[in-house]
Amino acid sequence: MDGETPEEGRRRAEDRPKLADLVDMNDPEAILAETIAVARLIQPALDGGFVRHVFGDVRALFDGVYPHYRRCNTDFHDFSHTTDCLLAMVRLMHGAWLSGLELSEKEVHLGLVTALMHDTGYIQKESETEGTGGSYTMIHVDRSIEFMERYFDLHGLSEDDFHLCRRCIKCTGLDVHISAIRFVCKSQEFLGKMLGTADLLGQIAARTYLEKLLFLYREFAEAGIPGFADEEDLLRKTANFYEITKKRLKNELSGMNLHVRAHFAARHGVDADLYIEAMDNNIAYLGHVLAAYGKDYRPHLRRGGIVHKAAGR
């Protein structure tokens, strides 16, 4: 704010809500309720029943009760990451709408569907009994699209709807040049870029992001992804990944992340980008832990009991 000192700005930031204070991210139903409420700020007549149905099916898929599929066994790319992405996606759409982007009811619906289905490719079919879904890391985007195509056929969604969602899910691939994806209009291109953005915001801003990196290393190792000698090496390279991510958000994804500030101001009365703050805090704390404790970092990653779960595997 104009005229305030750095110390006043720091105190003001400490006094206002943080990202994790807004919705109970351990409660999928609370996340779904907030998602529908925000979506209806864009399209008041939006059919919440449709979103709830898809949400329930994807949750069943991750829980291992969807026909012909095994339970999710990737602890980084789990259902909580999907719900993190879902909420980030609807916040981005709302912020963009506040900034003047026109989104039809169908586009809002399909934006939420793509967020729910973007990582379904990590789930193994009943016949896939070797290893875990982590082995599909390099091909999970295509597998997610294959699952979505079968789902759309089963539920009577149109071919045009599928192709829009296919293009959006392609935008979550970190090696994808989005300029090469042929969207039919600007609003649909923005949807794809918002999904690519929501995928990154949802994971890096999560309260347990640092702890879940222990599981990400295992997924990478199983998939044979080079560049990481061990778990600690991945942690030490995470700050560089974050710098690369910020460049991708700004350039390849056209700065879509900036729209969340308008959402937080309108929905929660907080004139700040709470995602970038949460991400910055996560990376800063990781740097502190590695600098202060070296290889003895695990006792200082305490959220969610995740370190104990990792040690038991």
Image (cartoon, rainbow, N blue to C red):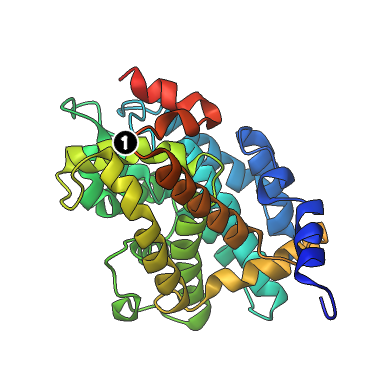
Nearer the observer, 197 or 245: 245
* Position of the N terminus by quadrant: bottom right
Q: Residues within 10 Å of mark 1 (few under 14, many from 20)?
A: many
Q: Which residue is mark 1?
A: 123
Q: Quadrant of residue 11?
A: bottom right
Q: Quadrant of residue 280?
A: bottom right
| Amino acid type, callout 1 | Ile
Query: Residue 277: image x %, image y %?
Result: 61, 59
Q: Is residue 45 visible?
A: no
Left or right: 212 as drawn, with respect to 187: left
Query: Residue 194: image x %, image y %?
Result: 51, 67
Q: Secondary structure at mark 1?
A: loop
Number of residue marks: 1
Left or right: 137 as drawn, with respect to 286: left
With respect to residue 86, does 126 lie above or below?
above
Query: Residue 299: image x %, image y %?
Result: 46, 28
* Position of the C terminus by quadrant: top left
Residue displayed at 34% across by 79% down: 182
Nearer the observer, 84 or 272: 272
Q: Quadrant of residue 131?
A: top left
Residue displayed at 66% across by 45% down: 20
Nearer the observer, 169 or 310: 310
Nearer the observer, 3 or 307: 3
Residue displayed at 32% across by 63% down: 174
- Residue farthest to the front? 292
Residue displayed at 66% across by 59% down: 274
With respect to residue 259, does 151 lie above or below?
above
Left or right: 237 as drawn, with respect to 152: left
Query: Residue 186: image x %, image y %?
Result: 49, 82
- Residue farthest to the top? 312
With respect to residue 151, does 42 lie above or below?
below
Q: Is residue 140 visible?
A: yes
